[in-house]
Amino acid sequence: MANVLIFADHDGGKVAKTAAELASFAKRGGTPIAVLLTDSSQADSLASQLANTDIESVLAVENSDFAKHGIPALVDALAQVIEAKKPDAVLIPSTARGKEIAGRLAVRINSGIITDAIDVTPDFGTTQSVFGGSFTVSAKVKTGIPVITVRPSSIEASTTSNTPAVEKLNVTVSDKAKLVTISNVQPAVKGGRPELTEAKIVISGGRGTNGDFTQVEAMADLLGAAVGASRAATDAGWYPHTHQVGQTGKTVSPQLYMACGISGAIQHRAGMQTSKNIVAINKDPEAPIFDLADFGVVGDLFAVLPQAREAIQAKRS
Ligand SMILES: Cc1cc2nc3c(=O)[nH]c(=O)nc-3n(C[C@H](O)[C@H](O)[C@H](O)COP(=O)(O)OP(=O)(O)OC[C@H]3O[C@@H](n4cnc5c(N)ncnc54)[C@H](O)[C@@H]3O)c2cc1C
């Protein structure tokens, strides 16, 4: 049975949901083993969050150098864990941070790397959606231990009744990985909504909102969704650039993506077209987003969204 290392990323207090998703991919071909790298004595509380997922065991490393020296120190530690445990593959979330870690790690361990996979087979073959989703590529690493980054929300993580065993490991971060010292970190101010790239549901607004995102946000809050925006909306200053979906924004792959007043330009599609279900609300029946949508409503978003909210609330009560 193949051993698959999962990089279980966290923000110091909460483990990212990508860990459980990667484990469900890993489980197809082997034994998912999470690696938790943390700067303080939080390993046990972080590991407890991995209960009832497909993760079978946890390798935990506590080292204060992770906070001081950031990604080079994490990569140094991961390389040492890989050297000690000799896994058959390494899965890492395809976030900006995950891809930086994966790239550096692949160089370090002299392995091939595949980024932005949306599917992983039991023998570590991957599927990627490229060039704005115009092509689907199947690829496999041929050199070394495959290092694969997988887009968040590419799979629905399964739940199993399980408490993974935790093994603590020690690593010594090399002087080379300590060349940069982080002097100050300012955490991003987070609202109450889920993180865009991790959300199961994303409600996005475009130029059609004319700068008024209240209906988009109200729908997001009703469904526990994240809010996204087209570049037209972010460039106009209507919504922060951190919420932009698309080629020059974030890539999302939620269970449900709702595009409100968004035409569906190729650059926008590049960031959302691997979403499992796409709903479009647009008053122009010829809008290209309808070519992509599983369900489309031709209408004014300011009329459609309140009605949709009412209908959802009525169904719930
Ligand atoms: C290099 C490059 C990179 C880019 N990167 C990105 C990117 O990352 N993300 C991105 O989104 N774009 C990106 N763009 C821009 C992209 O080409 C489009 O210009 C942009 O996506 C358009 O945004 P939009 O759909 O909100 O606006 P529009 O294309 O103007 O569409 C607005 C839509 O709203 C509809 N509408 C108007 N009023 C209403 C209403 N009341 N109710 C319902 N519907 C209504 C209209 O019918 C129309 O279809 C990029 C462009 C370039 C050149």
Image (cartoon, grey):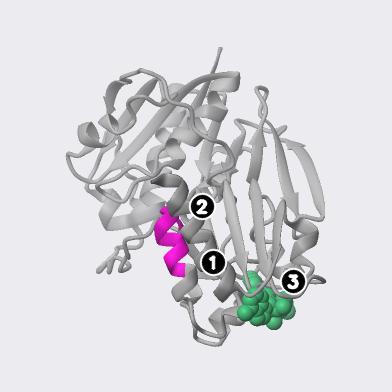
Q: Amino acid at mark 2?
A: Ile
Residue at the limit of the structure toward the bottom, as seen here:
236
Which label sits on residue 201?
2
Q: Residues within 10 Å of mark 2 (few under 14, many from 20)?
A: many
Residue in the image at 35% along x and 18% along y: 162
CA–CA distance in space, label 3 to label 2: 21 Å
Mark 3: amino acid: Ala
Question: Which residue position is annotated with label 1?
Answer: 305
Q: Which residues are magenta?
A: 217-225
Q: Is residue 75 above or below residue 83?
A: below
Judging from the image, what secondary structure is the residue with disc 3 in? loop
User: Residue 316 location, x and y as percent?
Assistant: 42, 46
Q: Is residue 15 left or right of residue 131?
A: left
Q: Secondary structure at mark 2?
A: strand
* Marks 1 and 3, the one that precedes in the sequence: 3
Q: Badges 2 and 1: C-beta atoms under 8 Å apart?
A: no
Would you say the beta carbon of the disc 3 residue lies within 8 angstroms of ligand 1?
A: yes
279 horizontally vs 193: left or right? right
Q: Nearer the viewer, residue 88 or 72?
A: 88
The residue lying toward the viewer, choosing from 241 and 63, is 241
Q: Nearer the viewer, residue 239 or 137?
A: 239
Residue at 54%, 60% in the rendered image: 308
